[in-house]
Image: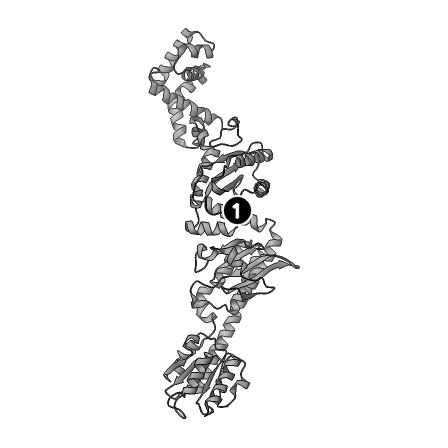
Amino acid sequence: MRENADTASRPLTVADVLALPVLAAGQPQVVAGVTRLDRPVRWVHITELTDPASFLKGGELVLTTGMPLPDQPAGVRRYVDELADVGAAALVIELVRRYHRPPDALVQACRTRDLPLVTLAEDVNFLEVTQVVHTLLLGNQAEAMRRTQRIHEAFTALTLRGAGPEEVVRAAAGMSGRTVVLENLVHQALICEPSGSTVEEALTGWEQRSRAVPSRDRTEVCGPEGWLTAPVEYQGERWGRATMLPPPSPARAAFGPEDVTVLERTAMALTIARLIHTTPWERAAHRDALRELAEQRHHSPEDARARVAALGLPAEGGFVAVLVDLRTQDNTAEPESVLSEELLTSGMPALVGALASGRVGVLLALRHYQPWRPTVERIARIALGLDPGAVVGVGSEVAELSDAARSFREAGRVAESALPGAPLPDGRSYHELSDIGLRRLLYALREDVRVQDYAERQLGRLVDHDARHGTDLLTTLRHYLDAAGNKTTAARRGNLSRETVYQRLRTIERLLDCDLESGEQRTELHVALAALDVLRAR
């Protein structure tokens, strides 16, 4: 909305009026207040009175031929002071009848009060100026009313379909063309939708900057940076506030009535979203931040650090990713909630959130590279208490927040390689990268058709022979390979005579067209047998 209507939606300024052909024909020259040409013009007033201020309400562009100006400097100063005090937008004087150059006293008085003073070297039809400008102003007002209506309709539609806080904030940023942030009562930025800036620019040092902005009971501009803020509350209970930030460049620093309308409707929609959606804002914010890190969706490492820091978590130091895969339930709400409370109680800073159905992610922030294994053990025991079939995988420790995605990928490989029903590692309830041996690697790759094809090519004929003839040559091969080619050990494990083992091994060699005395071929068959085992374990 903002992109299509930006020019029409902003107030008509002194500079805009001076650029109109009807005034440009008079060769306007700004001799005072040149830095204040961005003042909005509310109306145009033609006057030849010595006290025009008594008929003004502020925001008027005052047009005069100069005839009523006092002769004495003191009178000129009083004339300008009255205009400035009432809030006139600018004074335009025609240098055709009484003056051919602006009086020094008038120029000095306007400069003192920083009131724009514009001279016209050529005769201008003031009545035509008022007609043109008033037509523009009235047209802008009608268009502003239409845009305001569209804003109300957009937020009404969001509310009716039960939009969550993220969608509400995103819509507000899109309508206003400004960065919009939702924060809680302890000044943590829960949702940030940047517009015209980066997350880093918007959120760096957020808590300190936010605490410098006083909380108000209504929507207004306040604080050293000129933030537009609106409280988010219900029946006297305040939950946080919505904030609209001015752009990094001062080109559009002023907030207009439309911006106020957008932010007020944003606060209302956020209140309704809070009542409809039971997930606490903080938990949803952690979940979103976690997903961005795990999926590496942040625009830059600086953005990632700024977002995490704005949530009140360390953005520097070591980090380690933990994944909890729930094998007997898909509902992640309870594990997510329980793990969040446990980590909050333990004092270990972390992001916790559901990453997918049946999978909860945890990113531990390690202060001074503190030991993380005791914390992960607590996480694993809690997970197993909630779901006895849960598998907890841990990635490697990383030094940069932007590398968290790598730790999550590793944790995912660890969790996916855990064999069902296999015992836990000695002394712990979770799995690490070092636990991935041949069988776990093949189990993780079990969906790969190349692994399936390899196992079938190596052992398919042997399995088929056993099925047709009721033999058990595959077991004999297993004993032989497990014994590293020792036939005596293989015979003892299979409760067979050595001669029987010799005979069966020769049959195996014939069926598979292989040489079991070859170490390389024995290795190939051992891998194929391990692959067949994990494929059958699915």
Residue 7: percent from the left, percent from the top? 44, 70
CA neighbours of label 1 inside 10 A, class few (<14), some (14 to 19), many (20+):
many
Residue 123 appears left or right of 362: left
Residue at 53 percent of width and 44 percent of height:
349
Residue at 43 percent of width and 29 percent of height:
441
In front: 511, or 99?
Answer: 99
Q: How many marks?
A: 1
Q: Is residue 115 visible?
A: no
Q: Secondary structure at mark 1?
A: helix
Residue 88: percent from the left, percent from the top? 49, 80
Residue at 61 percent of width and 53 percent of height:
276
Residue type indicated by callout 1: Arg
**Residue 518, placed above or below residue 356:** above
**Residue 375, placed above or below residue 144:** above
In front: 301, or 192?
Answer: 301
Q: Is residue 123 visible?
A: yes
List the residue tagged with mark 1.
287
Residue 209: percent from the left, percent from the top? 51, 58
In front: 178, or 326?
Answer: 178
Residue 42 appears left or right of 338: left
Residue 151: percent from the left, percent from the top? 53, 64
